[in-house]
Amino acid sequence: LNECKAVIEKWIEDDPFVKEEFTNIETYKPSMRVSVNVENKDNGGLVCLFGNKKTIKGFISAVDKHYNLDYFEYDSINEGDCLLCEIMEYDYSHKSFQLKYISKLE
């Protein structure tokens, strides 16, 4: 197992994209609250950016109650708005964080 661990650590260290993704997953844990900027609003979903450089992608859906965003609130949100969210999990297939909506920030 030590050999496998060494190979994985080297891969993370040598690949800037993998290193950044791994660092983000280690930094942004479930239940952590983050301030996000709405980058795109479409078909009941919000794509948001957060982090120091606003380069980390997150997603919120008004279609699934799991995200805690009802349609009334969704309608009041616009691209460029700032929201307070809670991280639920990292979605490896979409390379983004699933976010639980808490409130709109003014």
Image (cartoon, grey):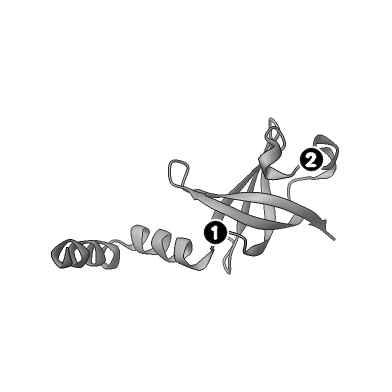
| The label number, if any, that marks residue 55 in the structure image | 1
Helix, strand or loop at mark 2: helix
Task: Kindly give the residue lying farthest to the front in the view shown.
Answer: 1
Q: CA distance from mark 1 to mark 2?
A: 22 Å
Q: Type of residue at label 2?
A: Tyr
Q: Residue 43: which quarter of the image?
A: top right
Helix, strand or loop at mark 1: loop
Task: Check the picture and name the quadrant holding the N terminus.
Answer: bottom left
Q: Kindly identify the residue that appears in the image at 35 percent across and 64 percent down.
A: 19
Identify the residue under disc 2: 74
Q: Kindly identify the residue that appears in the image at 85 percent across and 43 percent down.
A: 76
Question: For this view, does 97 lie left or right of residue 6?
Answer: right
Task: Check the picture and name the quadrant holding the C terminus.
Answer: bottom right
Q: Closer to the camera, 6 or 47?
A: 6
> Which marked residue is nearer to the observer: mark 1 or mark 2?
2
Q: Closer to the camera, 53 or 69?
A: 69
Q: Type of residue at label 1?
A: Thr
Q: Residue 42: which quarter of the image?
A: top right
In this view, 79 is above or below 10? above
Q: Kindly identify the residue that appears in the image at 29 percent across and 63 percent down.
A: 12
- Locate residue 20, reporting x and y percent: 41, 63
Q: Can the viewer see residue 81?
A: no
Crowding near the residue tagged with mark 1, few <14, some 14–19, many ≥20 C-alpha atoms within 10 Å: few
Q: Kindly identify the residue that appears in the image at 39 percent across and 61 percent down.
A: 22
- Locate residue 49, reporting x and y percent: 61, 55
